Amino acid sequence: MGARKRLKAEKLKEEKSQVAIAKLNNCPISARKMRLVADIVRGVEVNKALNILSHNSKEAAGRLEKLLRSAIANWEQKNEDKNLEDETLIVSEIRVDVAGMLKRIQPAPQGRAHRIRKRSNHTTIIVDSVKTK
């Protein structure tokens, strides 16, 4: 590997050490419903975000809370030399993407049938530490 490429790879690795990612695939909630809750905690400090999610009555909030706790644990695992209380972690990014659909049939009058689409989503949370001055 050349010198420039190695330096760039080391710089990228150092930047990624501050970031922790957690992913939830094939969650059986529609992406639209999940985005309503995700928009509330995007860009918020993690302790405040956990508090918001624990007091929200939507089903998606419980799943996002569990995913956020996983992202925090991933950050702790990556940064064993740092203390969580000393760092300011924020939810830097939440992506809610559409996943596959389960297609079901609902009987309808006069021998017809209606299609029922059970939607699901893929959710990704990225937690990042903020440099305090």
Image (cartoon, grey):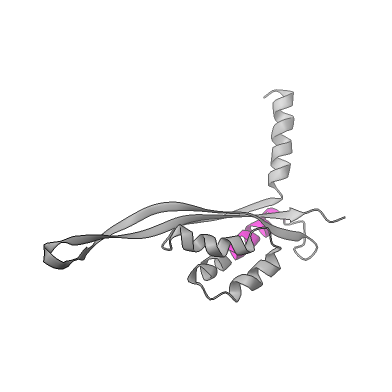
Spot the residue most to the front: 110
Instruction: Using the rendered view, name the quadrant where residue 113 is placed.
Output: bottom left
Pinpoint residue 117: horizontal percent, then vertical percent: 32, 59
| Of 85 and 98, the residue lying toward us | 98
Q: Residue at x 58, y 68 (%)?
A: 65
Magenta-drawn segment? 67-79
Instruction: Using the rendered view, name the quadrant where residue 69 is placed.
Output: bottom right
The quadrant in which the C terminus is found is bottom right
| Of 13 and 25, the residue lying toward us | 25
Our reading of the magenta stretch's main secondary structure is helix
Spot the residue most to the top: 2
Q: How many marks?
A: 0
Q: Residue at x 65, y 67 (%)?
A: 49
Query: Can residue 67 be seen from the camera position used here?
Result: no
| Of 93 and 3, the residue lying toward us | 93
Residue 116 highlighted magenta (yes or no): no
Pinpoint residue 93: horizontal percent, then vertical percent: 63, 53
Pinpoint residue 109: horizontal percent, then vertical percent: 15, 67
Query: Can residue 35 be seen from the camera position used here?
Result: yes
Spot the residue most to the right: 133
Residue 74 highlighted magenta (yes or no): yes
| In-image side of 19 versus 70 (left or right) | right
| In-image side of 94 versus 86 (left or right) | left
The quadrant in which the N terminus is found is top right
Pinpoint residue 102: horizontal percent, then vertical percent: 32, 57
| In-image side of 70 versus 80 (left or right) | left
